[in-house]
């Protein structure tokens, strides 16, 4: 299994692409495609067919996935984008540590 530097619920900053500089929260991770869905980032319009509940159909605006390499984790202490280090705590479980502030994420 591939390990990613971000998880669901993390606050991230977009570092490349059309949405460069924007920040948002990770809603979900798509592991097999190395992508993440970030709240309010990479918005697209999707046409929904008419159904019994919605007889006229409509156009829904939703977030499209963005590649993980274009995202950088935001350090909760400094509020700046940061890399992470992986270490183990005293119980042996893995933890993520911010490279900027040396704080546990």
Image (spheres, helix red, strand yellow):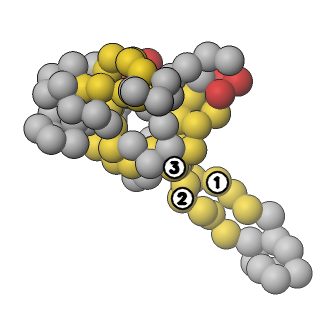
Quarter containing the C terminus: top left
Q: Nearer the viewer, residue 46 or 103?
A: 103
Where is residue 62? Give x, y as percent. Answer: 55, 55
Where is residue 10? Give x, y as percent. Answer: 39, 43
The disc, 2 or 3, on the residue closer to the chain's N-terminal end is 3
Q: Which residue is mark 1?
A: 46
Residue drawn at the location 82% of the way across and 83% of the way down: 53
At label 3, counting other C-alpha atoms closer than 10 Å, the crowd grade (few under 14, some 14-19, many 20 or more) is: some
- Residue 14 relative to residue 40: left or right: left
Question: Is there any visible trace of residue 18 in the rendered image?
Answer: yes
Q: Which residue is mark 3?
A: 27
Decide: is 65 above or below 49. above
Decide: is 90 above or below 12. above
Residue drawn at the location 15% of the way across and 33% of the way down: 80
Where is residue 60? Give x, y as percent. Answer: 60, 62
Numbered circle sitting on residue 17: none
Question: Is there any visible trace of residue 22 in the rendered image?
Answer: no
- Residue 92 relative to residue 23: left or right: right
Residue drawn at the location 68% of the way across and 18% of the way down: 1
The disc, 1 or 3, on the residue closer to the chain's N-terminal end is 3
Where is residue 54? Give x, y as percent. Answer: 77, 80
Residue drawn at the location 73% of the way across and 62% of the way down: 48
Numbered circle sitting on residue 61: 2
Identify the secondary structure beneath mark 1: strand
The quarter of the displayed image where residue 88 is located = top left
Dots 2, 1 in contact, CB < 8 A: yes
Decide: is 12 above or below 45. above
Judged by depth in the image, the label closer to the viewer, 1 or 3, is 3
Identify the secondary structure beneath mark 2: strand
């Amino acid at each position: 299994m591939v390990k990613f530097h971000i998880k669901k619920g993390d606050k991230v900053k977009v570092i490349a692409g059309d949405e460069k500089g924007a920040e948002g929260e990770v809603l979900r991770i798509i592991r097999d495609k190395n992508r993440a869905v970030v709240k309010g980032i990479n918005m697209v319009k999707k046409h929904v067919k008419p159904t019994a509940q919605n007889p006229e159909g409509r156009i829904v605006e939703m977030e499209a996935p963005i590649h993980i390499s274009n995202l950088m984790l935001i350090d909760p202490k400094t509020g700046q984008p940061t890399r992470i280090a992986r270490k183990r705590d005293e119980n042996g479980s893995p933890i993520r540590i911010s490279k900027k502030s040396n704080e546990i994420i």
